[in-house]
Amino acid sequence: SILDQVKSDDILAYLVQQSFRLKASDIHLECQKQALRIRFRVDGVLHPIAQLSYDKYRQLLSSIAVAANVSTGSPDAQTGHINKTYKMQNGELVTVNLRVETVPTVYGV
């Protein structure tokens, strides 16, 4: 996937930009058996957006955990938030407040 070639911080920025553009209310990062599935909730429906390798997912998860002040090693569900300004593709600066929730699963956090 193209996302596997992008730095983890840039992947998060890209996902936020695309979710904003599509007016998505949620970004779901879901560990599957073979890869990470990324879905956006748009108008109440989850839509598959991309898949990411586990190697790249671990880097992305680390970036999210640091930004949201959550632990990747905790066996319990956690809640954090990221308040950050992103530059959209059209140059517009948008400040977003992202709620981050982690839930341990069979295949990872």
Image (spheres, rainbow, N blue to C red):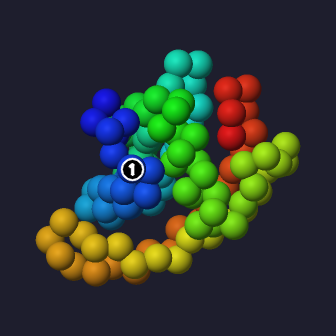
Which three-letter amino acid code belongs to the residue tagged 1?
A: Lys
**Where's residue 108, x and y in %?**
68, 33
Dividing the picture into quarters, in which one does residue 71 lie?
bottom right
Tell me: residue 96, above or below residue 1: below
**What residue do we see at 39% from left, 50% from top?**
7
Q: In screen coordinates, is 60 left or right of 109?
A: left
Is residue 43 among what the camera can see?
no
Tell me: residue 47, above or below residue 8: above
Dividing the picture into quarters, in which one does residue 67 lie?
bottom right
Q: In screen coordinates, is 12 left or right of 23?
A: right
Considering depth in this image, is 79 or 4 the residue closer to the camera? 4
**What residue do we see at 50% from left, 25% from top?**
35
**What residue do we see at 44% from left, 50% from top?**
8
**Where's residue 85, x and y in %?**
40, 78
**Where's residue 50, x and y in %?**
36, 35
Q: In screen coordinates, is 36 left or right of 51?
A: right
- Could you tell me which secondary element the residue under label 1 belongs to? loop
Considering depth in this image, is 74 or 62 the residue closer to the camera? 62
Which class describes the residues within 10 Å of circle 1: few (<14), some (14-19), or many (20+)? few
Considering depth in this image, is 102 or 67 the residue closer to the camera? 67
Q: Which residue is mark 1?
A: 7
**What residue do we see at 18% from left, 76% from top?**
91
Q: In screen coordinates, is 39 left or right of 6?
A: right
